[in-house]
Amino acid sequence: MTRRRYLSVTALAVLGIAVADYARILPRMPNLLGLPASTLRERVQAFADLLGVPFEAAAAAMRRNPPLFLVAIETIRRNIMGAADVLQLPAASLHPLYLRKPRLLNMPPTTVQRNIAELAALFEMETDEVVGLLIRHPALIGTSPKSMAWKFSVVRDIYRALGFPSDKASTFRTFPLAYTYAEERLQQRLLMAQ
């Protein structure tokens, strides 16, 4: 009978997970406890191979988004390929984005497509133009359209204070990354502009 080795302090160290971090993750994801260390290592290696990055880089991305440890690599591959199709980009061009923002790997292509449609409606723009902005500023892909809608009034007020066109499309075209800012940062920018 083969004995399965489950997570130990040594296995956690190989994955770059501190015991304290694991203790914080475990209550939210008790399923991790049942996975053998070899399975986790295989998943990290498969993720590294998929993105063409070193094991350590893949493990770091997965630590920032622990649910990835439980997701099948084929699901991750489908999400990457689907997002690439929606954005009309080579999948490899999205790999750096996924390393920086691994939670985007949880986003199925239908969600990416829906967000694009919502952004086009919100900013009164053509879909192709929204896709172009997302390609130039990939951080926008993970920003919720609802969050952007809420931020519009602050961004509009900043634009008005600076004497720039403040319609929805203009604010999104000229400085789309403002919509990724935290509320406090936008408020600070508004105070500086006034």
Image (cartoon, helix red, strand yellow):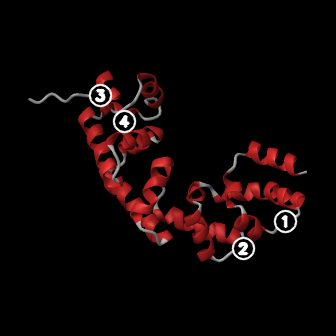
Q: Amino acid at mark 3?
A: Ala
Q: Earlier in the sequence, mark 1 or mark 3?
A: 3
Horizontal placement of 27 versus 158: left or right? Answer: left
Q: Quickly name the residue at label 4.
A: 31
Instruction: Count residues near mark 3 (Cα–Cα under 10 Å), then give few for <14, some for 14-19, many for 20+.
Output: some
Q: Nearer the viewer, residue 71 or 173?
A: 173
Q: Earlier in the sequence, mark 2 or mark 3?
A: 3
Q: Which mark is residue 164?
A: 1
Dot 2 and dot 3 residues touching (CB under 8 Å): no
- In the figure, residue 35 lies in which quadrant? top left
Residue at 65% over, 77% down: 126
Q: Is residue 146 visible?
A: yes
Residue at 42% over, 25% down: 18
Mark 2 lies on a secondary structure that is: loop
Residue at 74% over, 70% down: 169
Between the C-alphas of marks 1 and 4, the distance is: 52 Å
Q: Position of residue 80 (x, y in %)?
A: 41, 60
Question: Against 55, is 134 above or below?
Answer: below
Q: Position of residue 98 (x, y in %)?
A: 46, 52
Q: Quickly name the residue at label 2.
A: 124
Between the C-alphas of marks 2 and 3, the distance is: 51 Å
Depth check, mark 4 against mark 3: the one in front is 3
Q: Amino acid at mark 4?
A: Asn
Q: Position of residue 52 (x, y in %)?
A: 33, 53
Between the C-alphas of marks 1 and 2, the distance is: 18 Å
Q: Earlier in the sequence, mark 4 or mark 3?
A: 3
Question: Against 115, is 98 above or below?
Answer: above
Q: Amino acid at mark 1?
A: Phe
Horizontal placement of 172 versus 101: left or right? Answer: right
Dot 1 and dot 4 residues touching (CB under 8 Å): no
